[in-house]
Image (cartoon, rainbow, N blue to C red):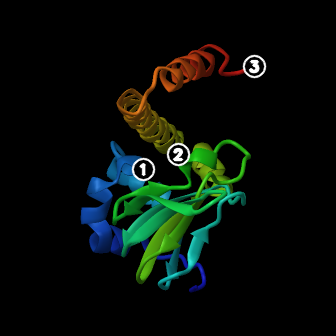
Amino acid sequence: MNAMTQRDPIETIGKFNDVFERCTLLSGLTSEEMLAFLRRVQFEGFTSGDEILTEGNQYHGVWILLRGTCEVIKHGPKRDSRLATLEPGNVFGEMSFFHPVGHSATVRAVDHVETMRLMLDGYEQLRQDCPTAAHKIALNIIRILSDRLRRMDEWTCELVERNSDGHGYKEWQEFRSKLYTNLFE
């Protein structure tokens, strides 16, 4: 694992502009907001097999994958499951960025990887110095999470209906009802 570094924001935009254009987290940022954001991030490289974040640990950071490929692994009682393969422009760490809980999965480098990470204290600085950028970042995190929740809900419904003997479907409907009605209890 390489040490975290800072970079010149202008050079960074030139080098990774195509990645930034695809990155949902950065959607809608003006040039000035992007510069303010880039002044508060750290860059870090990883080699194949390195764990960037580990299931259960808390880092309070949100990462953007700039180069390389990562896999998202969920550890299970019998075996590990690969949940996703991440490519440049993808974001991870967002589920526990604002909420002090451990990460729900492990993200591991498949090959040489370069990332950009915004820590919560950097976000707080951004909120003070450039509130419009911080607001857009927060809204984009909400969009990312709601999109993932929507896709997970659709996938789970399809899976339950396809493999249902009737019992699983009823359990799923009860769970969904509890999830959406008792969210903050």
Residue depicted at x 47% and y 20%: 166
User: Element type at marker 1?
Assistant: helix
Secondary structure under tag 2 reads loop
Residue name at image x 52 percent, y 26 percent? 168
Q: Secondary structure at mark 3?
A: loop
Classed neighbour count for the residue bearing mark 3: other residues with Cα under 10 Å, few (<14), some (14–19), many (≥20): few
The answer to whether residue 15 is left or right of residue 144 is: left
Left or right: 168 with respect to 120? left
- Closer to the N terminus: mark 1 or mark 2? 1
Instruction: Name the kind of residue labelled 2 in the image.
Output: Cys
Q: Position of residue 24 (x, y in %)?
A: 36, 47
Q: Mark number for residue 185?
A: 3
Measured along the vertical axis of the image, is residue 3 above or below residue 37?
below
Q: Which of disc 2 and disc 3 is earlier in sequence? A: 2
Q: Residue 1: give x, y in percent of width and height.
A: 58, 85
Residue at horizontal 41 percent and vertical 31 percent from the top:
150
* Contact (Cβ within 8 Å) of mark 1 with mark 2: yes
Report the residue that reaches farthest toward the front: 165
Instruction: Name the front one of labels 3 and 1.
Output: 3
